[in-house]
Image (cartoon, rainbow, N blue to C red):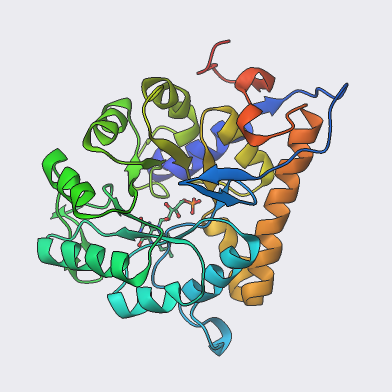
Amino acid sequence: MDYMRLSDANVINEKYMDSILIEERLIDSVVADTSIRFFGETFDMPVMTPAFSHLPNYGGREYSGLEEYSFAAKECNILNFCGMMENDQFEKLIKTGAKTVRIVKPYADHEKVIDQMRCAESAGAFGIGMDIDHIFGPEGRDVVVGEEMAPQTFDMLRSYVELTKLPFVVKGVLSVSDAVKCADLGAKAIIVSHHHGRLPYAVPPMMILPTIRKALSGRDVRIIVDCGIVTGADVFKAIALGADAAAVGRSMLSSLEKDGIPGTVSFLKNVGKELRYIMSFTGFSGVSKIDPSVLHFTSSDPCPR
Ligand SMILES: Cc1cc2nc3c(=O)[nH]c(=O)nc-3n(C[C@H](O)[C@H](O)[C@H](O)COP(=O)(O)O)c2cc1C
């Protein structure tokens, strides 16, 4: 096995997630309810779309991939996310009617950050955030599609929180240290993520989730997890380990590309159906009742009971 494969955080993540097993608790069990409350709204399931960018109009269809999955999120009544884009593109996404959190890039051009956050709020975003894990590249600072990124300080992030009335989400948290800083600076949610493997040997988000949950106990910060979320079983494990919700990622792309809005709706609904099935099988009637006691770790247990 070569270094690239050994160090690939996506491979490490997949292996870790697959090593977690689930026991059954059927007596007295009922068909579960997957709905959740998040930032004051009710959603049909704790499944969210990923903060994606740069998706074309697949198959020459009318809407871009970003708009298509936003329409799907609206139809599924789930929280929608989007990533790097210009303001006119974001305004188009808002027209889909999806409740959307705009994850602004950590641009070195500070004015651009502020402008995109202001635009998001005035256009009707549901929340605003930043992916803090896209700042370094092989040459030093990262450059994304020609735009330079910059490290973000605690004070910069706090100033974004203070700039908006909307809930602020920090994406790319992968340590207790950053999670606690996010709580201290006033973020209302974090996305525990390694941004599909930007850091070699990155700890699987689900492995670090229980310690982050514990560190944020009693703080008003919701926890979303992403990376390698493909099925309802993955979402179930994420919630059992301490997340409030999980976001799918590249797992959504083939349905989106091939079958657009209906394909994405079907993919997302199937994730939700499998989640409900597993909740029912494990005796959890609602999402907030799920706990880690049904999980069995075939590698080391990060969450001793
Ligand atoms: C095409 C594409 C575009 C993405 N654009 C962004 C982005 O602009 N901002 C961001 O925070 N994350 C972005 N991501 C990362 C995702 O939001 C997410 O963290 C990641 O895909 C999760 O890993 P997974 O695909 O293995 O599930 C992008 C991912 C892909 C595949």
At x 31%, y 66%, the residue is 120
Q: Quadrant of residue 104?
A: bottom left
Query: Is residue 2 positioned above or below 137 on the image?
Result: above
Observer able to see residue 109: no
Q: Quadrant of residue 172?
A: top left
Q: Choose between 175 and 240: the one closer to the eye.
A: 240
Q: Choose between 74 and 162: the one closer to the eye.
A: 162
At x 55%, y 69%, the residue is 69
* Image location of residue 227, percent across then percent down: 48, 46
* Image location of residue 140, percent across then percent down: 13, 51
Q: Quadrant of residue 215?
A: top left
Observer able to see residue 160: yes
Query: Is residue 210 positioned above or below 171 on the image?
Result: above
Which quarter of the image is occupied by the C terminus?
A: top right
* Image location of residue 251, percent across then percent down: 58, 57
At x 47%, y 57%, the residue is 50
281 relative to 49 in the view: left or right: right
Query: Is residue 241 positioned above or below 76 on the image?
Result: above
Q: Choose between 126 and 224: the one closer to the eye.
A: 126
Count of marks placed on residues = 0
* Image location of residue 158, percent across then percent down: 18, 43
149 relative to 34 in the view: left or right: left
